[in-house]
Amino acid sequence: MKTVAAPRVLIVGTGFSGLCMAIRLKEAGIDDFVILEKASEVGGTWRENTYPGCGCDVMSLMYSFSFAPNRRWTRMYARQPEILDYIRRIVDDYDLAPHIRFDSAVVAYDFDEATDRWAVRTAAGDVYRPRIVAAGPGPLHKPSIPAFPGRDRFTGNVFHSAEWDHSVDLTGKRIAVIGTGASAVQFVPEIAKQAAHVDVFQRTAHWVLPKLDRAITPTEKHLFRTVPGVQKTYRGAIYWSHESLIAGFMHPRLMGALERAARGLLRHQVRDTALRATLTPDYTIGCKRILLSSNYYPTLQRENVDLVTSGIAEFTETGIRTDDGAAHDADVVVFGTGFEIADRFASEHIVGRGGLSIQEAWRDGMEAYLGVAVSGFPNFFLMMGPNSGGGNQSIVFVIEAQAHYILECLKLMDGHEATRIEVRGGTQRDFNRRIHQKLAGSVWNSGGCDSWYLDRTGRNRAVWPGSSASYWLRMRRPGVDDFDLSSAEDRDEEDYRGPAVLEGAGLRLAVEVHLTGHLDPLDGHYHWYGQVAGDDRIADLKRPDAGVPTLRIGDGPLVDAILAERDPWGHFRITGVGAPPFALDDLLV
Ligand code: NAP
C-alpha cells in the first residue's frame, strides 16, 4: 500500500454529485482535490443504467445544473444517452478530467485522529490521505436481486436492469421480467417489440401518470439559444409546478387530484375491467414512487405480453414457477427489482472517530444531519445521504444545495483555523427526531404501502420532509453551533504509538499499538481506543472462550481491553474504558 496523494478534498464518484462538488470547489479557487471513480468512464447512474428505453422521468429542463443549462436537450424527458452526453460535456467544460482517477474503487475509509485526515484505500492498494472526503456513491447503486428459491438453477440468461447484458439478443426470445417499478415501465415497452413473449411479474400495482413527453421544437431550441432567460423561465415553471405537489405528499388527503388523473389514465388505456382491477393499487398515490408512462399499459395488452400476479414460488431450469403452480418458461430473466437502499452501507468499510464503524453508528438505521454530515465521522460528507432525497423534485437541485453546503463547511473550517469539523451528536439527534415526526403523517409513511423509502423498521430513511425550497434554504449556511471545530495541533488529547504486550488465552504477544482517547462528558469516563497489529495470533484472543485480553505498555498499568474486528489494513481495533494503558494526566481519568 502506498500513499499516492494527500489532497485537501477527495471526492468519490463522477455522477452528478461528485462533479457538482468538484465544480463548486474550482469556482471557490480550491484546486487541491482528487476525484476517485470506480469505473473507467464518468456518469454515475447514467453510465450504469443502459437498459432499453432508459431515460429520466424528471423533465430534462430541470435535469441539469442550474449554472450549466443544456441547450441541446432534444426532448421534454431526456433519454440516458443524452444525459450521459451532458455529463461528459460538463467534465470538459469545467476541465475536471485532470482531477479524475479512473478504475479507482474505494474499499476502505479510515479516519486518522492524529492528523485529522482520512486514509482512503482503493482496490488497487493506493492510499489517499485527504483532509475532507465528499462521497457521492449514489443511493441507487447496488442492484437488489431477491434470493428466490432455486435462482441459480435457471439455465438461461439472467441480469439486473442496472447491469443490462447487451450481448444477449432478445429478438424472438421468451423473457420474464420481475418487477414493475420505474425501470421496468421504461424497458418493458421496448423489449416487448422484439421478444416472442414477455411475462411481467407484478407483486404490487403501481400508480402511473401519463408521461407528457415530446420533442423540443426547433423554435423552442432557437429561443433557448438566442433569447436570454427563455430556458430559465421554462425551468422555473417546471420547478414550481413540481414544488406545488409537496403539499399532497405531506398531507395525503390532498392527493385526490393526482389519484383521479392516474385512474383516468387506467380507464382510458385499459378497457378490460379484470386487468384494470389488477393494475389498480390499493394504497394512496405517492406512497410508492409515482411512475410516468404513456406506453406501459398499452404494452401490457399486447398479444405477446402477459401480466403475472401470482407470487414467484421458485426458479426452475427452464423458467419460473408461480404459487398457483403455473410454469412460465423463459430464455431470459430480467430483474427490475430495484436497489439496496437502506442497507447500502452494510458492507462499506467506513471507520470514523474512536474506531466507530458506520455499521455501529447506524445500527438503528441510517441517519445524518441534513443528509450530509454524520456524527462520529469528522471531515466526511455524504452526498444524497439519508433523508435528503427530493420526493417531488429533481435530485440535481438537491445535489447543488449539498455541494454549496459542504463548501460553506470548508469555509467555516478556514474561519476557525480548524483541521476537524464534526456535526454534534445532539444536533443530529434533534434534527432526526424532528424530521421523523414530520414524516410520520406523510404519504410515504402513512399511505398504506411498503416501499424502498422505508427501512426494515418502517422508518423513512430516504426523503426530505418538505419542499425542496425549504431544503435549499436550510443548506445556505451551516450553523457554527451545529459543529465541533478543532485543530489537531491544539487538541488536548493523548496519543500513544509504539510497542505493547497483549495477553490472553494463554498467549503473551508483543504487538504494536496506536492509541488515543477522550474523556466522555456524558458518562464521565475516559474512553481509549485505537489499533493493534504485529502478530497473527491476535485473532486467537477474540475466540469466545479466550476471556478478556489485557494490554500493557512498558511497565504501565495492566488494563482490560476489548478487541473488535480486523480492518483491511490488518489491524485489529482495540478499545477500553477507564484508565488507559498509556500515560495520562490523572485528573482526566
Ligand atoms: P423499484 O422502483 O424499487 O421497483 C422494484 C420492483 O421490483 C417493484 O415492482 C417491486 O415490487 C419488485 N420487486 C422487488 N423485490 C421483489 C420480489 N422479491 N418479488 C417480486 N417483486 C419484487 O426499482 P426500479 O424500477 O429499478 O427503480 C428504483 C428507483 O430508481 C426508482 O424508484 C427511481 O427513484 C429510480 N429510477 C428513476 C428513473 C428515472 O426516470 N428518474 C428511472 C428508473 C429508476 P413491490 O412494488 O411489490 O415492492
Image (tube, rainbow, N blue to C red):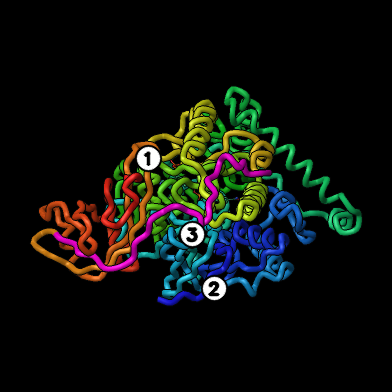
What span is in magenta?
476-503
Q: Secondary structure at mark 1?
A: loop
Which residue position is annotated with label 1?
A: 364
Q: Residue at x 24, y 55 (%)?
A: 563
Mark 1 Cβ inside 8 Å of ligand 1: no
Which residue position is annotated with label 2?
A: 102
Image-based side of 419 in relation to 322, left or right: right
Residue 496 sits above or below residue 433 on the image: below
Q: Residue flagged by tag 1: what amino acid is it?
A: Asp
Q: Residue at x 52, y 30 (%)?
A: 434
Please provide percent x and percent y for residue 527: 32, 47
Image-based side of 81 in relation to 429, left or right: right
Residues at badges 3 and 2 in contact (C-beta under 8 Å)? no
Depth check: 417 or 48 in front?
Answer: 417
Image-based side of 382 in relation to 566, left or right: right
Residues at badges 1 and 3 in contact (C-beta under 8 Å)? no
Sequence-earlier tag: 2 or 1? 2
Query: For the residues carrying marks 1 and 3, which lies nearer the camera in this image?
Result: 3
Q: CA distance from mark 2 to mark 1?
A: 34 Å
Q: CA distance from mark 1 to mark 3?
A: 27 Å
Query: For the residues carrying marks 2 and 1, which lies nearer the camera in this image?
Result: 1
Considering every residue shown, the one lying at the far front of the view is: 586
Please provide percent x and percent y for residue 455: 42, 40
Q: Is residue 398 visible?
A: yes
Depth check: 545 or 554 in front?
Answer: 554
Q: Residue flagged by tag 3: what amino acid is it?
A: Asp
Image-based side of 237 in relation to 440, left or right: right
Q: Residue flagged by tag 2: what amino acid is it?
A: Phe
The part of the image, by quadrant, that contains residue 75 is bottom right
Which residue position is annotated with label 3?
A: 116
Q: Secondary structure at mark 2?
A: loop
